[in-house]
Structures are given as C-alpha cells and as structure tokens.
Amino acid sequence: PGGVAGQENPNILGCDTNKLGLAEFLEERGIEFVVTADKDDDYCPQTGELLRESEFGKQLESADVVISQPFYPGYITPERIQKSPNLKLAITAGVGSDHVALKSSFDRKIIVTEVRGSNVVSVAEHVVMQILALVRNYIPSYKQVINGEWDIAAIADRSWDLEGKTIGTVAAGAIGYRVLKRLEPFDVNLMYTDIKRF
C-alpha cells in the first residue's frame, strides 16, 4: 500500500497507489491493468476452509501476466497457478522470486523473471548504513536518548571507529562491489571473495 506518501509523491512507483508507473502506458495500448493490495485469502483457523478469496486471487485466475513486489508480494502458490490457465509470465518488480511456486510455474511453462539490478544501489547503501549503525553502537545510543538518558561510557564501551578496520564481502557482484566502493573513503582494508577478481 502507498498510504499518504504514495498519494503525495507520484515518483514512489513501488506501491499500489502509483501502480508501478505502468497504468497509463498499458491502458493507452488497450491492455487491462488491475492493481490491488488485497492479496491474502482468508481461511478458517479451525478447518482451513477458504472463507474469502482475495482480489489478487480472483484477478489471477484470468490474468496472462502478474507483476508482484518483493516486499509486499502476492503469493503465487501451486493452487493459484492451477486456477490460472492463462498465466504465462510472473514478474517481480524488484528481485527475488521466493513468493512464486517455481516448480509449478516450470511445469506449466510460466516464465518467472525479475527486474535485476533495480535495487542494487539502495541495498549497497543500506549495507553501509547497517555497518555504521553496528560499529558506532547507534541503536543503544538512540534508545538512551529517547529514554532521556545519556551514559556516554556505556555507549563508548561498544562503539568503534570504522577507520583501519578490515571489511570483507562474500562476492563482489552488483551489490558487493558497490558496498566496497562506498566503504573506500572510510580508509578501511577491503577484502572480498568471488569467482571473478577485479
């Protein structure tokens, strides 16, 4: 769901409100484009009986293509695939396909794909942010301030400078390489292991 931020900022494409930025493009070409945040079926907790089918489940039954997001996915289960005879393509608007039943898709010759590289900068920057938060003991420091405390010794006891440390990545692909590049200005020793060497 896009919420207020999605309504106020049309550049936030990854939400139902802004429809991945595709609605106008597809509709101009006569392609029906349905967007919903109602993606989970409701089941009886005692019997497992289906009480209500989600809008996503209903629309999937007649869809040729489904586009889902990695952080708010519509699960494409074997049962949903079986009930969707027209489905030919399952796209993740991002990376990852763990929300798609891959064997069932393969058996039905449904192409499963993702938008590779779409979030490599964001993920690399997030990794650097997490490294800094851990090394500088940010979360406990933040909690102290919020609680009206400030025990500098307790914070400093588990806080270090990043400079001079050795940081390694497992692989230096699209994300790992960008992590390493962003850490260079911190004057750290960088290491990585990968099948390719730069």
Image: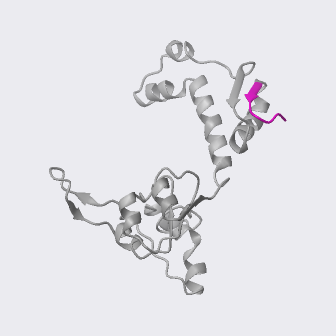
Relative height, residue 43 to residue 33 (above, below): above
In magenta stretch: residue 191:
yes
Q: Quadrant of residue 26?
A: bottom right
Residue 30 visible in the snapshot: yes
Residue 14 percent location from the top left of the image: 54, 61
- 26 in relation to 184, above or below: below
Q: Is residue 77 above or below residue 127?
A: below
Q: Quadrant of the C terminus?
A: top right
**What residue is at 52 percent from the left and 59 percent from the top?**
106
At a point 58% along the width and 30% down the height, the residue shown is 133
Quarter of the picture containing the N terminus is bottom left
- Give the side of residue 185 with respect to residue 51, left or right: right
Question: Is residue 33 within the magenta segment?
Answer: no
- In front of the other: 41 or 144: 41
**Residue 191 percent coordinates (x, y):** 75, 25
- x, y percent for residue 124: 66, 41
**Magenta part of the protein: which range?**
190-198
- The image quadrant that residue 187 belongs to is top right
